[in-house]
Image (spheres, coloured by chain):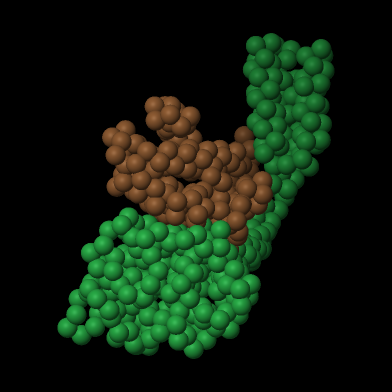
Chain colours: A brown, B green
Amino acid sequence: MISVATEPGTVATAAVPADDEVAGRGSGRWAAGTAPLALAILLGLLLGFAGGLLAPGLLRPGDGSPEAGFARDMSSHHAQAVEMSILAHEKTTDPDVRTLAADIALTQQAQIGIMQTWLKQWDLSPTGRQPRMAWMPDGAGTIKNGLMPGMATDAQRAELRAATGRDFDALFLQLMLDHHLGGIHMAEGVLELSDDEQVTELAKSMVAGQKKEIQLIQTLQGRIGTR
Amino acid sequence: MSISTSGGEQRRPSVVSTGKKAPAGGKPAEGEKGAGAKPAGTAAKSGSTAKSASTGKSGSTGKSGSGARVPAGRGGGSGGAGAGGKKPQQRRPVTPVKVSQGRSWGSIGLFVAVGVVAVAIIGYGAYAVVQNGKKWEDKAAAIDGIVNFRESDPSVVEPFPGKNSHEPGPQTYKVNPPVGSSHNNAWQNCMGDVYDAPIANEHAVHSLEHGAVWVTYKSDLPADQVEQLAGKVRGNEYMLMSPVQNLDRAISIQAWGYQLKLDSATDGRIDDFVEALRQNASMEPGAPCSGGITATGTTPRDNVPGDQQQPVPPAGG
């Protein structure tokens, strides 16, 4: 019994210093592990910081993206609608045409501001290196004499500036109808290509808004007898 | 006899079992010893319960049991201490140190390797983002031959001494074509308008202030080159184009404070200039190009609404 009791004791006493040694050298191992651990934490912090700094730049639409092409081209497309509508607001004698003109001019000028802000946020120039409409699969074919779909030619713009009275209203309504059809085509184009929420939301509102305005334009055309 | 044999049977398995299990390790041997001791005790008690005939035998079993225990204990103890006590003492201190040293160096190496790769990725990402987000001023400065009057001669851009930004009547500009300074209250329409005759500087400078790029050319520029320039302008708001009198080079393009003179419409720097400066050079971001003067003629028009102008005949379709 005694020998049995002492023998585990010797084993135990033999094991105790071994544990102490392991623990003692283990603290040395911890000390040796602090440097890589600190390095890992520092590296992790740097990675997280750099990632947060760079991720938006790497994830946002690039110079050749459909979003950038849409923002640039629709801005220019809108700008001509604003020009014609401001002219109509100034020249028309029809209150309904004047109201429609104010609606188009103010809405589309505000949308130009939204789209230009996108480009700034994406660190992109308002002017792209790609040709107009290159962001759409069938884009190149829609350009006529350097103009995007539905845009009035220089001759039509000059004609509109010269027109007066009922002729002016008739020409304005027809040019704006064509302009809206082209604009809807472009907005639907970016809806097929982009899943950027702010872009698709605005494009959807353009399609819906301009379709409603086309209905109004057709009603007005019926009233003044040009449809 | 039956008891002694049974006791002998009890002993033998304990000895045999310890002998078998002793090499396996110290702790099982210890357990064996305890287990071996208790049956011996119980055997002694059972011997005492059996009393009369079993005492000598029980004593013999006790002796033999103790005798069996000692070698078993020693054998198991020495074997157990040797296997479980001494060997761990030698192994434990030595091996963990080596392992810990190996691991720490390995992890440092790993962190360094990962760090280098991460820094390389970050570096490339930063490069791409910086290139993409290069300031328009830097893009403009990179164009060969461009003149930045905002830096080289601010007086070309600032209003004339004693004059306002908006001034009626003709102005005399320092450079031809002008790139800034006092100008007319009305701007030249710059909705991609292609004017086929000279326009008033006083209106065109106002267009530059709104962010337009003004493409000008010597009146004797070949028609195909004129049409090539017009193709860059037509349909693009914040662009306008007109011939200019007394131009010292074939082509000159202007933004507010910037000018680039060229000899050919095929020069790639035209696109560079437009990309860098169209709208970006604006002094009034968001200011319009529509609603401006659409007439040609070098005399500025004061207090004349745009719609009362003589319409410009369509230029080039």
Up the image or down, A176 lies above or below B253; here it is above
Between B200 and A106, the one lying in front of the other is: B200
Residue at figure coordinates x 42%, y 49% from the top left:
A160
Residue at figure coordinates x 42%, y 52% from the top left:
A79
Q: In the rendered view, does B310 fall on the left or right side of B100?
A: left
Q: Quadrant of residue B310?
A: bottom left
**Residue lying farthest left?**
B162
Between A164 and B132, the one lying in front of the other is: A164
Residue at figure coordinates x 50%, y 54% from the top left:
A155
Q: Quadrant of residue B28?
A: top right
Between B234 and B139, the one lying in front of the other is: B234
Would you say residue B128 is visible in this rendering?
Answer: no
Q: Position of residue A216 (x, y in %)?
A: 41, 29
Between B175 and B34, the one lying in front of the other is: B175
Residue at figure coordinates x 81%, y 12% from the top left:
B2
> Where, quadrant-wise, is the N terminus of chain A in this rendering?
top right
Q: Position of residue A139 (x, y in %)?
A: 63, 49
Up the image or down, B11 lies above or below B299; here it is above
* Numbered-mark total: 0
Q: Position of residue B178 (x, y in %)?
A: 37, 80
Q: Position of residue B295 (x, y in %)?
A: 38, 65
Up the image or down, B170 lies above or below A139; here it is below
